[in-house]
Amino acid sequence: GAGVSQSPSNKVTEKGKDVELRCDPISGHTALYWYRQSLGQGLEFLIYFQGNSAPDKSGLPSDRFSAERTGGSVSTLTIQRTQQEDSAVYLCASSSQGPTTGELFFGEGSRLTVL
Amino acid sequence: AQSVAQPEDQVNVAEGNPLTVKCTYSVSGNPYLFWYVQYPNRGLQFLLKYITGDNLVKGSYGFEAEFNKSQTSFHLKKPSALVSDSALYFCAVRDISGGYQKVTFGTGTKLQVIP
């Protein structure tokens, strides 16, 4: 597709279960970002991938959160032993790199509800 | 470190009146600045950006923003507000020093246009 694709769009899980959220960026975009948006809150940076460089994991809130990006394309955000405070919308975005570009293209998000 | 401040949680304006949504930023190098809009239950959409050149930037849906380096501001403006402009607006900054591409978002400002 032409845009950033995220799945699932909605996920309801029980406390303590693991979840995986997937992001398929725009073809050719070298940068990929994960953000978290809690109800009524702004965007919280989680992790950033740029090409083959080591990812910037500085925003991950705990060691229960991890992410990988395979082949420089699809990314998976994994949350282990989910807690109720993990409930949020997880947004993925991709971007091309260049001197006159730079805007992020966002997916529709994955809404996670932890019961 | 880079940061963005949106001092107003909510801005109310009457339909047909001009609107301003404020944003100030802090970066160590030269900034790329962005505005995004989020309609209810949707992902973020790019509105406009400042990279270099003319300080007044025009974007989608009649919005514009003015880059002011001395005041480190990038306020979003529109001459005549529409009810359909009601949404959540995010300012973002990317510090391009050294090629680093991390994008930091403000906390968002809810714009309410009153008929």
Image (cartoon, coloured by chain):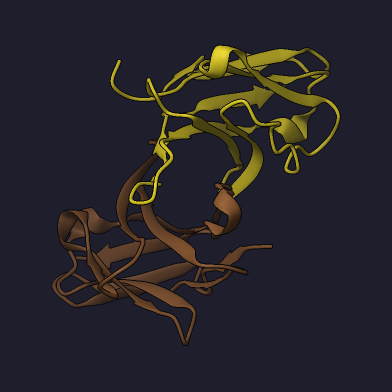
Q: Is residue B45 visible?
A: yes
Residue B44, position as x, y percentages in the image: 39, 42
Placement of the N terminus of chain B among the 4 image quadrants: bottom right
Residue A103, position as x, y percentages in the image: 38, 46
Q: Which chain is brown?
A: B
Residue B22, position as x, y percentages in the image: 42, 74
Q: Residue at x 54, y 60 (%)?
A: B106
Q: Residue at x 50, y 15 (%)?
A: A7
On screen, A50 above or below B62?
A: above
Q: Is residue A41 visible?
A: no
* Residue A105 location, quadrant: top left
- The hue used for chain A is yellow
User: Left or right: where does residue A17 sit relative to residue B82?
Assistant: right
User: Left or right: where does residue B2 sit relative to residue A79?
Assistant: left
Residue farthest bottom in this picture: B70
Residue A45, position as x, y percentages in the image: 63, 44
Q: Is B40 or B67 nearer to us in this picture? A: B67
User: Left or right: where does residue B89 sit relative to residue A66?
Assistant: left
On screen, A45 above or below B109?
A: above
Q: Residue at x 58, y 44 (%)?
A: A39
